[in-house]
Image (tube, grey):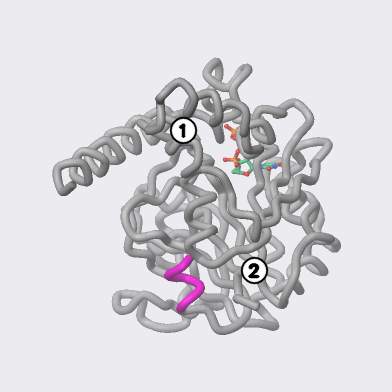
Amino acid sequence: MSVLDTVVFPVAGRGTRLLPLTKSVPKELLPVYDKPVLQFAVEEALAAGAKRLVFVTHASKPAIGDYLRPDDSLTETLRSDGKARLAEALDAITLGRDVEVIFTEQDEPLGLGHAVLMAADHVRGDAFGVILPDDVILGEPCLPEMAAAYDSGHMIAAMDVAAQDVKKYGIFRPLTDTSLGRVVRASALVEKPSPEDAPSRLAAVGRYILDTRIFDALRQLSPGAGGEYQLTDAIAADATSMNLTGYRFSGERHDCGSHAGLLGAANARAAEVTQAVAAE
Ligand code: UTP
């Protein structure tokens, strides 16, 4: 079994920062030039070898299930209308028969830690992936890189941020010099520190490979920042007993939970598509 047999996608949040865009459209389905935000996450999981995709969703977001379910009659209609290219675009997002899709609900968005716990019964193997779809990473797919470098414990995608931005992220407390290399061993993760208190400038972003023992820590969790069950609190608790690693990924991350991030991702994706067309 591949390390990343199972990838979990927490998609039950309210997306309030993007209102009114997200009043009736889930933020995970907002467009990034030619594809919805969620499609990038699914492709990344498949590239990492995932065979089981677990979506932690909410009853108010049925469009996510609609997007992921194949629509054979639409594809057939397009083909019979001579629109083969459009039918191919739908085929391209249709998941293979060897990929299992599971939906589980989070009744209330009580935080990322709570959302990941909702997937516990559906995870196979000793470790599993988590992708936060609103962190769109273009260029080199992030999760496959992480899977190749993973050995044990919890690994989180990491990127260097400016000193004034450390307060927006979980920041690694490295065990070694962070200036070199992609794999950074850490002793802790400090949530949203001030620039003066930050143990480094290496920030955690939305890709994780987690040892399944995280579920024990999640079950014992109390609400943290903002009254939410924070995944980083459970990871921090485990860091005393297992490896915690940051992985400096090669791609370019866009925060598609914000307007500026969505626009930046769309522009970068448009450039990617234009380049690919020119190379054909
Ligand atoms: P965010 O905190 O960015 O999403 O969570 P949000 O809460 O929907 O956004 P705002 O702050 O209200 O604008 C990152 C990912 O985790 C999911 C979200 O759907 C998003 O994909 N999430 C978050 C859950 O599934 N459940 C939660 O309780 C919280």
Disc number at residue 5? 2
Label 1 is placed on what type of residue? Ala
Helix, strand or loop for the magenta stretch, by majority: helix
Would you say the residues marked 1 and 2 are in contact, meaning their CB atoms lie under 8 Å apart? no
Give percent across and percent down for residue 23: 61, 17
Q: Quadrant of residue 239?
A: bottom right
Q: CA distance from mark 1 to mark 2?
A: 29 Å
Compared with residue 92, is residue 76 higher up or lower down, i.e. above or below? above
35 in magenta:
no
Answer yes or no: is residue 197 visible: no
Compared with residue 31, is residue 117 higher up or lower down, i.e. above or below? below
Could you say which is closer to the camera, residue 236 or residue 105? 105
Label 2 is placed on what type of residue? Asp
Q: Which residue is mark 1?
A: 87
Q: Residue at x 40, y 59 (%)?
A: 141
Q: Residue at x 63, y 18 (%)?
A: 24
Q: Residue at x 50, y 41 (%)?
A: 91
Under circle 2, the secondary element is loop
Could you say which is closer to the camera, residue 245 or residue 62? 62
Which span of residues is magenta-colored?
Answer: 144-148
Disc number at residue 188? none
Compared with residue 59, is residue 96 higher up or lower down, i.e. above or below? below
Tell me the quadrant of the picture where the N terminus can be found.
Answer: bottom right
Could you say which is closer to the camera, residue 123 or residue 96? 96
